[in-house]
Every structure is written in structure tokens, then in C-alpha cells.
Image: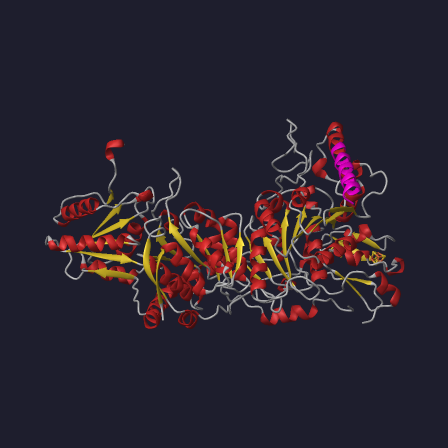
Amino acid sequence: MPMRKVMKCNEAAAWAAKLAKPKVVAAFPITPSTLVPEKISEFIADGEMDAEFIKVESEHSAISACVGASAAGVRAFTATASQGLALMHEVLFIAAGMRLPIVIAIGNRSLSAPINIWNDWQDSISERDTGWMQFYAENNQEALDLILIAFKVAENERVLLPAMVGFDAFILTHTVEPVEIPDQEVVDEFLGEYVPKHAYLDPAKPITQGALGFPAHYMEVRYTVWEAMENARQVIEEVFDEFEKKFGRRYYMIEEYKTDDAEIILLTMGSLAGTLKDFVDKKREEGVKIGAAKMTVYRPFPIEEFRALAKKAKVLAILEKDISFGISGAVFADAGRVLVNEKEKPILLDFIIGLGGRDVTFENLEEVVEISKKALVGEKVEEVNWIGLRKEIL
Amino acid sequence: MELPADVKKRLTLPAEEHFYAGHTACQGCGAALGLRYVLKVYGNKTIFTIPACCSTIIAGPWPYSAFNAPLFHTAFETTGAVIGGIEAALKAKGYKVKGEDGIMVVGWAGDGGTADIGLQALSGFLERGHDGLYIMYDNEAYMNTGIQRSSSTPYGAWTTNTPGGKKHFLERKPKKKVIDIVIAHKPAYAATASVAYPEDFMRKLKKAKTIKGPSFIQLFAPCPTGWRAPTDKTIELARLAVQTAYFPLFEYENGKYKINMPSPSKEPKSLEDFIKLQGRFKYMTKEDIQVLQEWVLSEWEELKKKAEIFG
Amino acid sequence: MAESPFKADIEKVQKEYGEKMTPGAIVYIPGSSVVNKTGGWRVFMPKFDKDKCIRCFMCYTLCPEPAIYLDEESYPVFDYEYCKGCGICANECPTKAIEMVRETK
Ligand code: SF4
Ligand code: SF4
């Protein structure tokens, strides 16, 4: 019987790791993710988990050790955030290029400067081009589930790409919620053991991994990563189905809420999705035709699902906790690519919100709706809007 | 084929080749020769990790490999961490690491990848006590990027970013003693070796395989291209480096230092013999040579003292 | 060792070698570098005088390619398909049984 426990999201991530049984965990402490490896150490110390835990001297070495372990043919896991993920940057490309299905749990946190330990998604969003799949959790349960799902998708032979699962710093990492912990036997059935067929370092069958790729071959290698990421769409759907059958919880690439007759749809990721649902309920009572959507998978970008969502809206407002300076939020830029050649498309607006742990209030959301309403009646509005800015101190 | 008995006695290195011809090292490359020895001793029961360096090129571009052993290419500064990860994975899988029939996990990185950018990962590897071997092949500069000074470049050397010139802009720092940094971690085993003394090197490789815990070997591997030296002088230079005490051979084990025989037993040879064969030292003045000579002798005295006190 | 230790491998590589891209660009054939005949790099070639040779194996031991193997009587054989002509063997031979001569192509 699945067990219900009240726990922080970091603990839920550690539980997911315990259930997934990685053979190697390599991690370095960083706020707000430290509790993940801490809890894993406890599991190992108590004999509840059997893994080699490498207490590395940096995140760069954490991911490098995971790369070595995964290349040697075992399941590998780590957790980090913010500067830690940024420090891993160069090795993230290597893991994807070598097709090593490592999973990282990320307590999504802002990047310096100024130094700030609170929530936004700048850390993982900035890694969007590395070839890693990206999942974002709305709550602690989703974090646990998505880590299991991430391993399953990553290790699929049609994919063989690493994955990161993000959950908002403090808002989730340090907040206790009831979480259902699936049975180990069912997880074992779901995941199985990781037995790489494409390659692993073993003297019995000497291979060379990561050899220099000349211009005559480099593009083809990168193309195979593109193909794998394309394949991941289908595999993610299949794994979502299987997950539902085994555990009874359903996931969608994009999950919609009251969108059917909505004129304005607010799309976001992570914990903010919960707030949006409450807000939509309130606005519906006031008679506003509004809906919400939560994007659970950011890479591969859910292109078809996004187009289907866009068809329903007159104004599609993207609320995102990241900024790509000189253009817009990253999700907005991606959405542009997805809709650019569509004949019918909604007005697309970008709202930069909640950076560095700034609270997202209903007042902020009202402002989003006001701007969206203006756009709806044909008034000219800014495409990229910073919401909740304290203009008085600027 | 059976070799005649007297011949067999003299042939001290294993006959099998696991480092294959067709590799793309420069002519007379000391590092390539080093790799050949390592693979001869460990055979293909070895998992190699090589960061971005000359050896990336030497091993060959896709779809080629000069290695008849598993080989993993990684980022410049990650060698220590990657071999830690591989070792942990092998242990978790229940494979035997080290020992007579165990798998040898070997990191093979240059002086830049070890003394500079990879120093942190190396320190982590040593401090955590991973059961592997880290070999630093020391050719005293960043050769793969086109001969830039590293912290292992000696005083007075020309490199492309210490180019001599009118202002006499040469390397002005003494060679960093990486081995001393390694020994500060009190590893299971640390040694210096030279491609000119394959028997000594291979003995050390064998020893590293029997000792539990992290081992480190700093292998002196001349680079004719980067040292502006004739390609046929690789071994002669490596030998002179030992005979002049510029690069003495020694071992550190259980807190004890032991100077190995090829190192000078009496007065070391004059450093000039070593210097004059190399174009990289041609800008040195008499005074420069004196500075380097004094450094060599004082380091040598220090090592002898260590061997005396901790012998 | 009467033959080059790489002969068999070259055949294997030539038979199995294909440019077909592998996941993660893995090289599945160990030692596949043998198809790359580095002998073409040579400017000077080692000329061997068997009469002077005392079979000390210095040349065999110190060749970085390796491009020297030993024949039935354990005399060195120079593999000109791979010898890059570095001259280490000639420089280290104690009896001067090897001489580097300019190659005429
Ligand atoms: S010249 Fe160099 S490459 Fe050729 S056989 Fe002699 S040592 Fe080997
Ligand atoms: S080094 Fe000279 S003497 Fe020794 S085996 Fe080679 S050719 Fe013969």
C-alpha cells in the first residue's frame, strides 16, 4: 500500500531517488537543494538505500562524477540549484551529447548578481539548449512523481537523454505537504534496472566514448540529439500513460484549467500554477472568461499541445520567472516559434514575474488581466511586461 | 613464437600492444610512448579517462580509436571527478577494482589539466580516497592549444605567451611542484616517472595496481614540438632531466620518500646539457640558466633531505 | 611477433568500419586507428643494419608508435606503414645499427 507522509519537497525528491535506486549519487550542498542529498545520506546511513554517495568538492565535479558513473553503466542522480547548476553548464552538454540518462533534481533558484537564494527559474531555463529534458513540478507530489517519470523517459532507448526536474525554491523545497509514497515493488516494476545497451565502459567490450568529432561528423551527432529529443515527446506520453496505470495520477505536457470558453488564458509552470487556479476561480465568479494552463514539460517543448491551447484563447498570457535579456522571457520566445506560422493565433503577451523570490500576489495577477483585457479590445500594450516592479525605488 | 632464452630475459616489457599504431601524436611524442607503456602493463583491463588535451587528438577522432581498452573523453578540468564516478559505479556493480585481476581506473591528463584547471578535481579524487590512478603526463605547457605556459612550465622557458622578444618576456616562475601538493593529501601512493626509464615506470604502474586507495604518477614526457627540440631527442632529454636532477625519480608511500635509482647518486649532471638541446630555452641568459640551475639543486637537496628524514 | 601485431585488426576494422553514426558517437571498434597509415608523415626513415644489432630491444621499447616489432630471431622489424621517422630508435641504439636516411619517394 502506498504510504502517505507529510514532507518537504526536498524530502520528496530524496524519496524519489530512494525509490529509483540510483547506484551512484554525487552531490554538493547548495541552498535550497541541500536537504535532498542530506536526506539521501540518511537513507544510506540507515541502510534503507544502497548507493555509492560521492561527496564531491563542487557541482562541476558532482555532474562529472555522475557522467563517469552513467558512462560506466549505472543509474546516477544529483540535486542542485542556481549557481550550482550554472557551474555544471559545460558538463550538461557532455552528458546529453554522450546520451547519458542522468537525472538532476533542481530547487529552482535565481542567479547572481545580486546573490539571492529565492525562487525563480533562471537556473534551469538558462540550460535549455544543453540537450536535457526539463520537467517542472507544481507541488511536492509532482516532484516525486516527475523524478520517477524522468528516469523512465531518459533511459528509454529511443531517447537516452538526461533530464532535470525543477521545483520552486522555498515555495516548494521547504514547504511541507502530504505526499503519497508509492510502493517500492511498483516502482521497481515501472522503472526496472538501468541496463544500457548503447554503451558502457567495460573492459569486456572496449569502446571509446566522446571521441573528437570532425566537421564531417559533428552535425550528425548533434542531429541525433535533436532526433532523440523529438522522440521524447512520444515517449513522455507513453510514460505518462503507464504512470497513470501504475500509480493513478495523470500528467499532461500542458494541463489546462477552465480553458474551454476562455478568452484570456494564463500559462505558467511550477508552483504558480496552483495560485493561478484559485485566481481563475475568483475571476470566473466575477464573470471574466478566463482559464489557466500549466506547462509540465518545457523540453521538449510541447509544440502541438501549445498550439491546441492557443487555438482556444484570444489572449494568451505567459507568466514566467525568468528573463532572456534583450528579447523577452524564454517561454514567450519559444511560444513565438511555435505560433509564428499558424494562421489563427491569439495575442501573445509576456509577463516577467516573481524573480528572486518576489511574491506573486492576486494584485499582480489583476494587473496581468487588466493588460490582457486591453489587448483583447485592441488597445496597444507592451509585449513584455515586468509585473510587480517597485517602480518607486527605481 | 618462442624467443631465445637470453633474449627473453632481456625483454622486460609485456609483448602485447593495446595502444595501436595509426594514432595521431606528433613525431617523437613522449606522451604517446607513455600511453603505450600504461596499456602494456594494464592491458585492456583498464578504463581510461582523458580530458581535452593532446591525448584527445592522439587517441583519434570518431570513428577511430588507438585504444584497445575502454576510453572516456571528458572536459578539461573533470578528470579527477570522472574517474571517481567510474570507480564508484564499478564498485556498485560489484566489479573488482585494482588488484591482480581487478579493473584499473586510470585518469590520464596533461600538466595544464592537472596542475591548473584540473587541480580541484584532482584534490577531490585524492582526498576522498577513490581507488584509481591519476597519471599526469608532464610536457610542461599547454601543448594542444599551441604551446602556452602552464604552472608546470619551468623558469626561463619560451612558450607562445612567454615569447622572449626584446623585453625578454620569458616564463619567470619556477615549475609548480604538483607532486608536493599531491603528497600533502597523504595519498596511498605517489611517484614521479620518466618515459626514458620504462622499467621504473612500469614497476610503479604495477605497484599502483596493488595498492588500495588513490595513486598518482607524474610522468615526465618531453614534447619535441613544444620544446623546439629535435624529434629524436625525446628519450635523451627525459634521461638528462633525471640525470641533472631537474626531474628526479622518487616514490612516496606510507609517509615515506624513496629516491629511485636512475636519479643521480653523486653530483647531478650540469643542467646545461639538458637546456642546450631545446629551442625553448634559447633566450635564456647565463644568469637565467644560473637561476634555473640553483632552483634545481635546491629542490634536489630538499628531496634528498625528505628521503633522509622520511625514508 | 613475427608479424605486425596490428595486421589482423586492420582487416577487422576495414570489414566492420562504417561511417554510420552511433548514439553518442561511440567508437565500437577498439584500435581502429590502425587504418590510419602514419608512415606518410615520414621525412627520414630508419635504415637498419642487422650485422650491428645486438638485440637489446632499445628501439622496440622506445618507439612511440609503435612501429617496430620483433621477428622470429627477435631482430627488430620496422613497420614503414606507421613509422613517422622520429629517429628515437636511431638516437638510442647503442651500436648505431639504425641510421636515419632521407626518404626518397
Ligand atoms: S623512427 Fe621513430 S617511429 Fe620510426 S621506428 Fe624509429 S622510433 Fe619508431
Ligand atoms: S636498439 Fe639497435 S641494437 Fe638494440 S635491438 Fe634495436 S637495432 Fe638492435
Q: At 43% across and 52% down in the image, what residue appears?
A: A35
Is B78 left, or right, of B39 in this rendering? Answer: left
Quadrant containing the C terminus of chain B is top right
Displayed quadrant of residue A150:
bottom left
Asked if one can make out residue A315 in the rendered structure from this viewpoint, the answer is no
Q: Nearer the viewer, residue C72 or A254?
A: A254
Q: Nearer the viewer, residue B147 or B265?
A: B265
Q: Residue furthest front?
A: A46
- The magenta span reads B294-311
Give residue A132's position: percent from left, percent from top.
42, 57
Does residue B310 belong to the magenta stretch?
yes
Give residue B22's position: percent from left, percent from top.
66, 60
Count the marks: how many? 0
Above-or-below relation of B3 to A132 = below
Give residue B99's position: percent from left, percent from top.
69, 63
Above-or-below relation of B143 to A96 = above
Q: At 72% across and 55% down in the image, what residue appears?
A: C64
Displayed quadrant of residue B298:
top right
Is A322 left, or right, of A24 in this rendering? Answer: left
Is A9 left, or right, of B192 in this rendering? Answer: left
Give residue A131's position: percent from left, percent from top.
42, 57
Q: Nearer the viewer, residue A266 or A207?
A: A266
Q: Residue furthest left?
A: A287
By secondary structure, the bulk of the magenta-drawn segment is best described as: helix
Quarter of the image where ligand 1 sits = bottom right
Asked if one can make out residue B307 in the rendered structure from this viewpoint, the answer is yes
